[in-house]
Image (tube, rainbow, N blue to C red):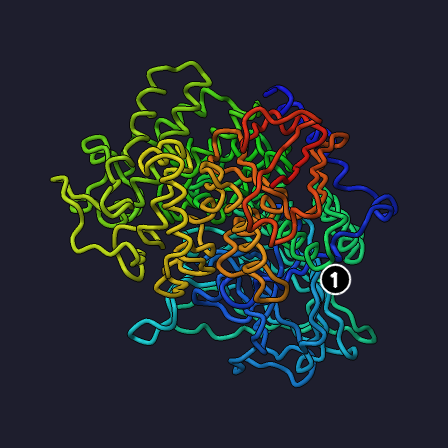
Amino acid sequence: MRALAAGLAACWAACVGLWALPVQAAAAAPDLTRLVDPFVGTQGTGHTFPGAVLPFGMVAPSPDTNDRGWSYSGGYQHADARIRGFSNTHISGAGIPELGDLLLQPRHGSPWTAATTDFSLAKDRASEQASPGYYKVRLPQGQVTVELTATARVAWHRYTFARGGKVQVLVDGQHGLNFVMGELPDGRQPERVRAVADHAVRAEQGEWQLTVHSRNWVERQASAALRFDHPIHSVIDLPLRPGERAPRQVLTFDLKGGRVLQARVALSTVDVAGAWANMAADRSAGFDAVRQQAKAVWNEHLGRIRIPHAPAAQQRIFYTALYHVFIHPSELADADGRVRGPRGEVLQTRSGHYYSTLSLWDTFRAVHPLFTLIAPERVDGMVQTLLDHHAQQGYLPLWTAWGRETHTMIGNPALPVIADAMAKGFKGFDHRAALQAMVETSTRPRSQAAEWAQRDWTLLEQFGYLPFDKEPGESVSKTLELGYGDDAVARAAALLGDTATQQRFAARAQGYTQLWDAETQVMRGKDSQGRWRQPFNPDTPTSPLNNPGDYTEANAWQYTLTPALHDPEGLRRLMGGPQGLERWLDAYFSRQAAGDNKHLGQEAMIGQNAHGNEPSHHSAWLYAHTPSPWKGHALVQRIAKSFYREGPRGLVGNDDCGQLSAWLVFATLGLYPVTPGQAHYTLGLPLVRQATLQLGPTKTLTLTAPAQALVPAVRSRPHRVQVQLDGQPVAAPGRLSHAELVAARSLRFDVAR
């Protein structure tokens, strides 16, 4: 069966040309892009962006309404009245701002001068529109309509002015999305840009270039190549503000009798030559052709799951979620395969692919398992990226931005991603090298890691857990999250017949049992003498930046379920067996929360369950391990209906590079990878009557459920679900292996009282 999974991936890769179908051929298929609203999640805490991007694209031109602060991790809040400009790289749904490279802002009218300080322009709300691969807005003050589209490595801008003549474009090389708020105590701006190089303006060719070395969330280098379709008439150099190093210039163009100015932007992690080569490799025929090609690519990806009989509103919410899933991780390698790795050194990719914006603490849970089903041609390249990162850094990545390690979040979330790919039969990387990287990541000291990151393993090896009096914060969460990583190493070792490594890490993965407090019925901090944390309130959430304590953006209730990510049966035994787990979950979902606190991970609350943050994403599915799985079916539907909506406020919580959205995709299908890394799915009950998955160019799987399964009154009463795979009852109730799923043609859910 594992060979089948590998074969499907290879078939997808061989047929990757299907993504570039001629527009005429694509026109015969349903236009699923009309069901996507890129504005979903752009107001509040979703932190998505509305601009143009391809699936896994390197560039993402999008409007920026502010350049700093947590709320502007995507550079944009929909309610803002003014747009500062349009930068060309963005991260979707993160909790920390980064990227925002090379901002452009066009205008016509009273000319900007070197004394101008505010280049923002009011937007015409009614004119603002977005669809996959395309964005448009009118800026009345600038007498211009801005359109954006993109190929994989090139951002395309088209500015249509109210009339011809001389027009201006601000080109801001200093701009970026900043983690640090406001000014420094002495009034200076934080020095995001540390150095610049390669700046040149070639007026006759309409070209502009720059390399910027910056430090924000990560320290990185970005080289930009900019080409207009008109010569540059004149240049105004803007004075550097305190703390700035990069040029900000106002370029003037004489359109004469014309009204349209177009620009292309290419970027590179390597150098400006790489950026220009990326632009040269893009042989697109023009803006409209790029827009149509982007639409075709998105339709192909969105068409990998069809839910044709769902209500229109549900389809819009679902396909918007699927759209957000496909944005990241981003292809970062240049057209020639070169890229700067985690230490800033240039490497030649082994697979031709190198992915970044790897929000692994979030995405190992559902995004990467979903890719193994509906984007298997990407999986080998993603895993090889992890191994290339390890080869340069010495350990596997935690959370990368622009190829650099942020050391954000905890645990070793790359480990279940690799174990999952191995267990599902993906062969496009060296499995023994992968196991070696997994072991080294879990045992070697990391002297260069950030002070809050896991630096060595002495305490874990000595105590079996991390004592709160010796570990600087988050001791419970770190212990529990390291457990699923250790389990992943053990399972990878088992696949390769390495019994000693399997036994070592399987034993270490059981460290969570030492933090189970039978009296309070939660995972609780313990010191090096074996004493429980005192005083203790399991309802109090903690977070290293806002309320430091034993937990990471969560409280004791929410983190108690973390061991179920690798050992649900073991956790169930601690809680007193199936009935004990059911009682615990009943209390968890009904115990009143202290209130929402977005900075402590407390959003989208049902009892203590905080669906707005990742530690709670698998919780409702654990009812499958109790005598009452139907309670989970009801909760999954309630979560989907309550916290996924249309409109800019349609997401409650950071989308985290598609993880929040991937949960909804799996929930709609009626299954979920509760234990990522173990190549099976927990079965629930679909939220649609029919869904068809495109598992390869010629391979489909159809899931069906009766109409009564969608009725909340039915789901919330005791019932049994009978599941048939290709007409035969599923062997293990409530559970299905990946190999069984991808080999099947049909999966049928029936409901009985």
Query: Residue placed at 62% from the left, 80% from the top?
Result: 122
Q: Amino acid at mark 1?
A: Asp
Nearer to me, 205 or 102: 102
Decide if residue 510 is on the left or right side of residue 467: right
Which residue position holds label 1?
Answer: 229
Query: Residue placed at 64% from the left, 83% from the top?
Result: 111
Dot 1, how many residues are within 10 Å of its Cα: few (below 14), some (14-19), or many (20+)? few
Is residue 139 at all visible to an observer of this figure?
A: yes
Location of residue 701 with respect to 517 vertically, above or below: above
Picture quarter with the C terminus: top right
Nearer to me, 130 or 520: 520
Location of residue 323 with respect to 313 vertically, above or below: above
Q: Residue furthest left?
A: 529
Query: Residue placed at 52% from the left, 56% from the top?
Result: 93
**Where is residue 287 shown, x and y percent of the image?**
77, 58
Location of residue 203 with respect to 372 vertically, above or below: below
- Residue 53 picture quarter: bottom right
Nearer to me, 83 or 161: 83
Is residue 272 at all visible to an observer of this figure?
A: no
